[in-house]
Amino acid sequence: MKKLTLKDVAKQLGVSTATISNAFNRPDQLSANKRTEILEACKEIGYTGPNRAAQILRKGQSNIVALVLADSLDYMVTDPVANTFIQGVSRVLRENQKHLLLYAGDSDSITDVVDFVDGFICYGAPRNGALSTQLNQQSKPVVTVDFNLEGRPAINIDNEKASYEIAKAALRPGDRAAILGLRLIDSPSTCRIYDSPLLDAESSITHRRLDGYCRALKETGIEVATDWIWNLPENAGMYAVQAAREVLQSSPRPDVILCMSDIIALELLQCALTMGIDIPGELRITGFDGIEEAARTRPYMATVCQSSVEKGMEAAKLLLSGDNTSMSLPYEIKVGETI
Amino acid sequence: MKKLTLKDVAKQLGVSTATISNAFNRPDQLSANKRTEILEACKEIGYTGPNRAAQILRKGQSNIVALVLADSLDYMVTDPVANTFIQGVSRVLRENQKHLLLYAGDSDSITDVVDFVDGFICYGAPRNGALSTQLNQQSKPVVTVDFNLEGRPAINIDNEKASYEIAKAALRPGDRAAILGLRLIDSPSTCRIYDSPLLDAESSITHRRLDGYCRALKETGIEVATDWIWNLPENAGMYAVQAAREVLQSSPRPDVILCMSDIIALELLQCALTMGIDIPGELRITGFDGIEEAARTRPYMATVCQSSVEKGMEAAKLLLSGDNTSMSLPYEIKVGETI
DNA sequence: TAAGCGTTCTAAATCGTTTAACCTTTCGAT
DNA sequence: ATCGAAAGGTTAAACGATTTAGAACGCTTA
């Protein structure tokens, strides 16, 4: 009992295959009568419509959009920021009858999907840098988010400005300051950056955040040596714990710690509170992102709020529109109680 | 500048298309020499391998697996249980070079993907019940998780037994008991179930949990009227809040409240604590799932721990193996401090 | 010498559509 | 009476591969 094909149906109904195809795809190519007649006959005999696999080949369009996440899905799916982003993307895709294929940014190559997907949304710099090149060399549309790809439209907030502003709000002249950063250098575990070469410095948003911090520090007359900058390989609690301990146990302890994500900042806050450090009396902390948890702590986190859902929605809309213009989204500085 | 096709390559190298195809797909069909020779020539001229869209049509295989989530992705991606499940699935798929397509369980139908995906993993009963029927009528492999589909392999824990055990641990003779349930009846918002007809009673795991609770209640000599059973349409905090308020404000207040998920139980705990109710002195609470947050509260939650990652991994393995045998996973009763 | 056999490669059918190009018929306008 | 355009179809060539059946070749064996 094989599945019905368009050809079978055409034979049964005594019309050409083109007519059946048109009935499903191009209503203007045949009379309304004929069309409903055909559609009903199809329902009758159990033909649910053209085979999608064949459509993909023939049309060169699959309605599948690949969401390339920075890292392995293992990790990315759990991160609340990535998570809400996915939510936003999926909502818009859904509305447009598109499908969502999750793709890991540490994959070997995109050759196994590039032939059939309709486009890529690239969230964060892929861990495997070669993917960026591949993405840029192929001809399907690409929208980047939280990182940049030469010539492709990007969705971003102004990370440099936001970082500058939150840092400015936290810093006082004469402070000792430390930075807990993210993906600044290539390293498998948490460590200070010292003189390691910076990673991807032009396209990465965390380098923009670093730029913003540095501008604020300079303006306030504060020097930060690279051994006061920590680097986390991923935005996850386990990496943050180690950095938090190290920075809090160093002496003299900093007066301000600028964190490049709320996940990091929250872990640091937790750690500081258990050590009995008074926040913000003895230590000020800033985060980044504005995840829900950051608003629920006592004292609640000073951070930069950006809407991940919106980012996701805009990214998907941009991809589907075929437009090629980048977009800068708004953000909000939330002063909170930690500075 | 069109993309190279296998035919172009064959012409250029002066061999047949079959040989090129074999070089990529069936090494045993040609000599090793010829093969490496061809592969290198391909690399040289920039042919990266057979077009995937064409392969999908011809082979009837795409390496894409659809993960059908119970609800809209919007919500499912955020739920920590679903989340870690996805993680497990993606890990195994990745290892096997398969791709993950996220599919919403409240979609109209699966006809738009069934032609090209290799199989389905179905996580929880799809909100649109018609999907279950469609999934079962088509011929691609299906693995179900946390619900059952006649004749298809399922991955589950013994929900009835686990619920019985956690309830048994919480209940004392003479207790007044309430239940905060999930998807027991068809209702768009939180409400008591009264005499509403049960939904999907045979295939749903929450009904198994209800069975377990009821057995424990009966054994302990406790009666529970249906107006002491709340139903939440989805496992989300916002629905739980309302149920929590209602049940805590009812008088006389129950001595024990059995919750069908940790999300619900945590919201209830939060609510009870703000009302100044002593846990477990004045009120005992049980959860279900064993999410991380449930271990971090004071007092920490009595619950049934199951590994969602493992569930995901097993589901994916089962699907890929083509095996047809269901599987019962282990769980653990964690007594915690709330009973 | 002819048959047998393993190896390597080729030709052609197939997968299930879409769509540009073409063919009739009808009908009002010239 | 003739033309042109519109309406409503049909034909057949793609789309880019996979795969079966069999041809050609070189070699052994009876």
Image (cartoon, coloured by chain):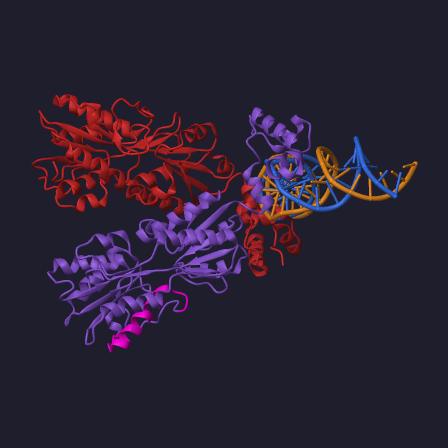
Chain colours: A red, B purple, C orange, D blue
Image position, residue B3 (x, y; %): 56, 29
Give the tally of numbered discs: 0
Q: Which residues are magenta?
A: B202-225
Which residue is nearer to you in this view: B319 or B336? Answer: B336
Q: Which residue occupies 63% across, 59% down? A: A1
Quadrant holding the N terminus of chain B: top right
- Position of B151 compared to D23: left or right? left
Q: Is residue B84 magenta?
A: no
Q: Is residue A142 visible?
A: yes
The x, y position of residue A238, in whole percent, is 27, 41
**Residue A205 placement: quadrant:** top left
- Percent coordinates x, y for residue B132 in the rendering: 45, 60
Quarter of the picture holding the C terminus of chain B: bottom left
Residue extending farthest to the left is A281
Q: Quadrant of residue A210?
A: top left
Look at the image and say whether residue B222 sits in the magenta stretch: yes
Main SS class of the magenta portion in the image: helix
- Check the image and report above or below for A6 versus A301: below
The answer to which image quadrant residue A66 occupies is top left
- Residue ID at (20%, 68%): B256
- In this rendering, is residue B291 above or below A282? below
Q: Tell me what residue is drawn at x 38 percent, y 28 percent.
A: A149
**In the image shown, does A209 or B25 lie closer to the viewer?**
B25
Q: Is residue B210 above or below residue A248?
A: below
For residue A97, say whether it is visible: no
Tell me where residue B42 appears, x and y as whole percent.
59, 28
